[in-house]
Image (cartoon, rainbow, N blue to C red):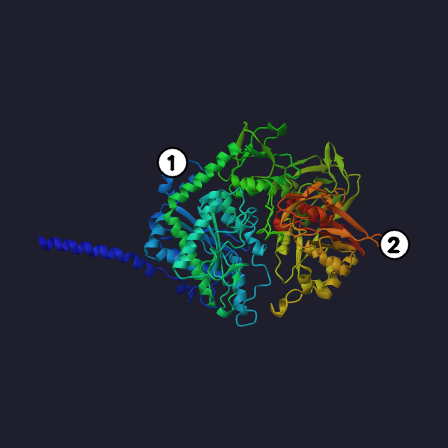
Amino acid sequence: MILKNSRRKVVVLTIALAMSCIPMIMAQNVPSPEDVYGFKVGADYKLADYTQIEDYLSKLDDASNRVKKVEIGTTVLGRKMYILFISSEQNLTQLDKWKDISTKLARVQVTEDEALKLSEEGKAIVWVDGGMHSTELAHGQMTSELAYTLATSETTEMKKIRENVITILMPVMNPDGLDIVVDWYRKNMGTAYETSRPPILYHYYMGHDNNRDWFMNTMPETYNVTKILYNEWYPQIVYNHHQSSPSWTKISLPPYADPVNPKIHPAITAAVSEVGSAMTKRFSLENMPGAIADNFYTMFWNGGGRTVPYYHNMIGILTETGHTTPTPRFYDPEKLPKTVAGDTPTDGTDIMYPDPWKGGESHFRDAVEYMLTATWATLDLAADRKSNYLHNIYKMGASAIEKSKTEGPYAYVIGKDQWDAFESVNLVNVLLKGGIEIEKATKSFEANDKKYEAGSYVIYTGQAFRPYLMDLLEKQNYPTRFQYPGGPPDTPYDLAGWTLPFQMGVAVDKIAAPMEITTEKVAEVAKYYEGEVKGKASFGYALSANTNASVIATNKILKAGGTAYKTKAAFKSGKTNIPAGSYIVSGGSVSIDALASEYGLEVTGLSSEPKIEMTKIHTPKVGLYKSWVSNMDEGWTRFIMDEYAFETDTLHDKDIQTADLSKYDVLILPSQRVKSLLHGNSTLEMPEKFTGGLGLEGSVALSNYVKNGGTLMAFDEASNYVIEQFGLPIKDATAGTDNKQFFIPGSLIKTGFDTTHPLAFGMQDTVAVSFNKSRAFEIEKQEKKGEGGTEDIKDAPVPEIEVIANYAEKDLLMSGWAMGEKKYIAKKPAMVKAKYGKGAVVLFAFRPQFRAQPRGTYKLIFNTIYEGASD
C-alpha cells in the first residue's frame, strides 16, 4: 500500500515536472530575433530591413501560440502591414470576446452595472508601435525583441502581463521608409555620410508628416491603423515610440508640457502622468539614468499618433528616446552641460529630471533597452490596473454623452446644399474614419428656420467620442503663452488651429435643442451624393467650378482624348446657372455618366455653344520641383497632383538647370527656404550627387522659362525666392519682424478673394487659409520723396501685378492663435499674379495645400494650372 502511494506520488511529480518544463521547451523552440537576423537587436552598425523583419514575424507566429500575426493592409508602395496580438494562449483563443468587451465599454453600449462586470471580466488592450519616423531607427528594430520576450519570458511579471493584457504590437508602421533608411545607412557605412539622412522623403508623400495625418487619414498607412484603434479594438493605452530626446538625456516621457486642450477629459491627463511616473520609477530602480519629463510636447494639438487618442478617451503615450543611429557616440563627462532641454539642471535637483545621465559611451543598444524598459513599465501598469482602465474608458465616454445634454449642442448637421458637396461628403468620411457615429436623414426636416433635404448628415453629439467631434468641428482658442514675462511667445507643439469645416469650405450647422429627425446610421463609408446628367449635350457637358470633383473629371476626360474648355463668365442653360470658371467637356472614352456617379457631380448637358468667352485647355503638363533637401511640402503637393489626376514630372536641380522647360504648362515651387532652394545640401552633409541647389543656373533657367511665356507657381517661403531672384517689385510685409511683434503659429486666417479673377473662379469670397508662420505681400510703389520733400516727376510704369486675395481687414483669426496680425497682415495681399516677360508668376503667401487639409483653397492651384494649359 505504501509502495503504491509512493509510485502514485512519483507519477504525479513526474507529470508536474514535465508540465513545468513545457514553457521552457516552448521558449527553446521559438526563434529569437538574433537567430533570424544573425545579430543582436541594437548591435552597433547593424540594422534589419523589412524583409528580414517580415521573415522573423512569420517565424515567431508559426512557433508560438502566444502570438497571432494579422495583416491589416498595404502601404502606398504596396508593402504589407502587420500587427501582432500577444497574450496568453487561452486569451488568444478568445480574441473576439475581449474585442467585444472593449467595444461595449469604449462606445458606452452597456449600463453602469454591466460595465462594472465587463471591466472585471475583460482584458486591458494596449497598443504599442514602432517604426513610424524611419530615421528614428531603434523602435522599428526593438519591436522584434519586445515581441519575442513578451511571448517567451516566464518571469512572474511577463506571465501577469500575458494573463491580463492583450498587447497589440505594430512592429513597423512605415515599412517603405524603413527600407529607404536602412538601404541608405548600409550604402554609406564607413563614409563621412554614415549618419546622414536620405535626401528623399521616407514616406512617399508625407515624410515626417506621417505623424501629422491622424485625423485626415489621407494615407493607407494611417487609415490602416486608425481602423484598428477607433473602429475595432479601442485600446485603453496607445503607446507611440519615437526618438528625439533632448541632448545629454536618454529618454523624454510624460508628464508633458502645458497647455492641455480643455476638450480632453481631465482623467486622461492624470492617467498619462501616471504612466510616465511608472516609467520614471522603473528607470530609477534599474539604474537607467537620463529620463526627463515636461519637455516641449503638449496635450493640445489634435492630429498626432499619441494625441488623437486623447480625444477618444484613450491614454496616449509618446516617448522620445536618444541615439537614433547604429553608429556609437561618446559624450565626454567633463563637458556635461549645467542644463539640458532649455533650463533643466543636470544636478538632480529638478523634479522632472531627478536622475540625470552623466555621459560616457552611447550605443544603439541603449536606445533599445530604454524603449523596452518603458514598454514593460506600461504593460505592467496595465496588467495591475486592467479593470480600472476598462471601467475608466467607459466612464469618460458616459461623461461625454452626458455633456451633450448639459452643454450642447444636441447635433451638427452637414446639409446637402453645399458650395462643394464633394468636400462635404469628404468631411463626413474624415469623421467616420476617426470613429464618429453619423446618421443620414431619410426625410427632410427643419431646424433653426432652415430646411434640410433628405440625405443631409446628422451627427449627434451624445456619443463617447464627443471630444474628438467637437475638437474637429469647432474653433480652436489657443491660450496666449509666453516663455517668460515680456519674453517671446511659447511656441505651440505643431498647430494652434485646424477647424475642419473652415479648412474644407463646408457649412456645418448646430442644433441646440433635442428634436425628432428620421435618420439611418451611415456605414463605414459615406457615398458621394447621387450624380446626375441632365439636358441634351450636342455641344458638351458643363461641370461647376465650385466643386473640386470637376477637376478630377476634367483631367480624366482630357487624358481619354476628350476636349475641355474653361468659361470666363457665368451663363444659364435652361434654368440652370453655370458659374464663371466652369468646365465644359466633351468626347473621350470616359463615360460622363460614370464620372457623375463616382464623384456625385451635377452635370448639365449643353445643346449649343455658350455665347460667352471660353478658353480651350489641353491636358496640363506640370513640372514639380523636388530638392535633394527632402521637403514635405513637395510631397504633399505631389500627392494632390496625383489625387486629382494631373500629369506631373518631378524635376530635380539638374532638370531645372538643363532640361527643356518649355514643355511644361506650369512649374511649381513648393514652400522651401530661399537658402535651401539656392544652395541645397553641402558636401559636409551629403554625397556630392545630392548636393547643391538651383543655384544661378537654375534661377536663370526659371527666369527664361517665365519670360518665354511659362507660368511659375510658388508657395509660402518659396515666394521670397522668386521675388528676390526675379527682382519683382514685391516684398514680404512680415520680413524683419520678431515673434514678439508678429506671431501666427499654424492657424486659420480669414482671407477675401476676388472671385471675378480667373485664378479665383469657383472660390467662396471669404475663406480660411492655412497660415503657418507664413507671410503677406506688399507691392512696392514709386518713391517721389527726396531730402524730405516731394518731387514733381512723371509716374514710373505701374507694375503689372494682379491681387487675387487679401487677408481680411478685421477679425482675421478664425481658429488658433495670432499676435500682431492686424498691424502686419490685415488687408495685405495673400496671393498675387505678376507679369514677367511673356509669362507670369503666381505667388502664394501661404500654403494652399498644407498637409492636404485646406480643401477650400485647392482651386487656386487648379485654376493656375489650367490657365497655363490654355491654348
Pick the front one: 524 or 691 = 691
Residue 250 in the figure: left or right of residue 557? left
Up/down of 592 relative to 674, above or below = above
Can residue 662 be seen from the camera position used here? no
Q: Position of residue 863 (x, y in %)?
A: 72, 47
Label 1 environment density (alpha carbons within 10 Å; few <14, some 14–19, many ≥20) = few
Q: Are marks 2 and 1 in contact (CB under 8 Å)?
A: no
Q: Residue furthest left?
A: 1
Residue 343 in the figure: left or right of residue 771? left
Q: How many marks?
A: 2
Q: Which mark is residue 393?
A: none
* Mark 2 or mark 1, whichever is nearer to me: 2
For the point 25% across and 55% down, the residue is 19
Q: Position of residue 149 (x, y in %)?
A: 38, 58
For the point 45% across and 44% down, the residue is 234
- Counting residues from the start of the chain, the first of labels 2 and 1 encountered is 1
- Measured in 3D between alpha carbons, the distance from the residue under mark 2 to the one under mark 1, in whole angstroms, is 85 Å
Quadrant of the rendered structure where residue 660 is? bottom right
Residue at the spot of label 1: 114
Q: Position of residue 1 (x, y in %)?
A: 8, 52
For the point 65% across and 64% down, the residue is 680
Q: Position of residue 302 (x, y in %)?
A: 55, 47
Can residue 263 be seen from the camera position used here? yes
Q: Amino acid at mark 1?
A: Glu
Q: Amino acid at mark 2?
A: Gly
Q: Secondary structure under badge 2?
A: strand
Residue 582 in the figure: left or right of residue 489? right
Q: Secondary structure under badge 1?
A: helix
Pick the front one: 858 or 146 = 146
Residue at the spot of label 2: 789
